[in-house]
Image (cartoon, helix red, strand yellow):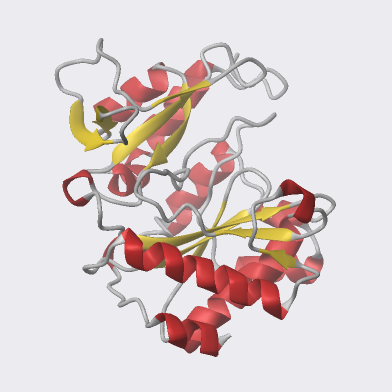
């Protein structure tokens, strides 16, 4: 019973990943994967596992990635197929955290990512306001952006790139965007990580745009009281949640997501295919 309060079992978790494989695998394929394992369930301890377990089957692909002076080169798991996905689930890796890069081009992110994290009493409704400002800012720059729930408290906004670019380009760009948003509405938005600055505000976390960090995958379960999922949504759903001031509009559990996928397919598919050039930093700051 990995989610005791919800009565959601390990078997149900494995079944979810098996059934969602067709839409999650394109977002994992070829990317170094950090496992977040909860062997005794969400109410007990967990650990992150970067190094792919030595007892892995022969058919699990790995990628050697330089992970800093302290860790050296690490063989990360690479989840390229349904069998690997189910094996990872069997390890009680409830959450899947891939790189923003493919292993073969680890210095080249394929997206620009913003994690909108509300500091109580702010919640996902305030995140909706900030996400729409991000959408409009990038829209003014001629760029499409796509929202997903974090599956936890907030929202995430991805801007697909899929062009030749490095983290030396995306990280300062994301930081500058967060700072511009903070200056435009300091009572709502903060770009600095210090927890004492975040009460009642939304942190625009730009720091995930880093070669050595990972972000929770779209369609990943989350280790909360209930088996919520990081779920791709449409902008009209974000607008609806904001208009109604109803966080439940953007709350999805495993069963909800399977129904959405059957009906809508993969709303995050454009992230894989859309090619967009990162504008000059000056253009972004002037746009806001």
- Where residue 143 sits in the image (x, y, percent)? 41, 80
Whether residue 250 is visible here, answered yes or no, is yes
Give the quarter of the image for residue 132.
Answer: bottom right
Q: Is residue 228 above or below residue 50?
A: below
- Name the image quarter holding the C terminus: bottom right
Picture coordinates of residue 49 (x, y %)?
40, 24
Can residue 198 be seen in this snapshot?
no
The quadrant in which the N terminus is found is top right
Classify residue 40 as left or right of residue 250.
left
Foreground residue, 192 or 218? 192
Q: Residue at x 29, y 51 (%)?
A: 101
Compared to 282, does 126 lie above or below?
above
Q: In the depicted view, which residue is nearer to us: 135 or 11?
A: 135
Residue 21 sits above or below residue 171 on the image: above
- Name the spot of residue 233 as percent of width and height, x first: 54, 60
Residue most toward the front? 69
Q: Which residue is depicted at the point 43% across and 35% down?
A: 96
Q: Give the left or right position of residue 60, taking residue 269 as reference.
A: left
Q: Quick one: 232 or 145, which is closer to the camera?
A: 145
The x and y percentages for residue 16 are: 46, 31
Rendered image quadrant of residue 249: bottom right
């Amino acid at each position: 019973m990995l989610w005791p309060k919800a009565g959601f079992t390990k078997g149900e978790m494995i079944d979810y990943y098996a059934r969602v494989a067709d839409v999650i695998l394109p977002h994992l394929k070829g990317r170094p994967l950090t496992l977040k394992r909860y062997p005794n369930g969400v109410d007990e301890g967990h650990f992150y596992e970067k190094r792919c377990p030595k007892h892995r089957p022969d058919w699990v692909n790995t990628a050697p990635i330089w992970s800093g002076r302290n860790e050296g080169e690490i063989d990360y798991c690479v989840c390229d197929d349904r069998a690997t996905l189910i094996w990872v689930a069997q390890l009680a890796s409830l959450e899947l955290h891939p790189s923003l890069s493919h292993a073969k081009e680890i210095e080249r992110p394929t997206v620009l990512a913003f994690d909108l994290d509300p500091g109580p009493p702010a919640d996902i409704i305030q995140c909706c306001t900030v996400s729409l400002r991000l959408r409009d800012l990038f829209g003014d720059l001629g760029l499409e952006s796509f929202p997903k729930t974090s599956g936890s408290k907030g929202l995430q906004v991805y801007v697909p790139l899929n062009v030749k670019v490095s983290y030396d380009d995306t990280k300062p760009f994301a930081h500058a965007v967060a700072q511009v948003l903070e200056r435009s509405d300091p009572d709502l938005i903060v770009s600095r990580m210090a927890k004492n600055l975040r009460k009642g505000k939304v942190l625009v976390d730009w720091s995930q745009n880093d070669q050595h960090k990972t972000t929770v995958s779209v369609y990943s379960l989350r280790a909360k009281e209930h088996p919520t999922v990081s779920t791709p949504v449409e902008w009209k759903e974000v607008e609806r949640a904001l208009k109604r001031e109803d966080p439940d509009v953007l709350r999805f559990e495993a069963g909800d997501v399977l129904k959405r996928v059957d009906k809508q397919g993969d709303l995050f598919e454009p992230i894989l295919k859309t090619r967009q050039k990162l504008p000059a930093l000056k253009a972004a700051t002037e746009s806001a």
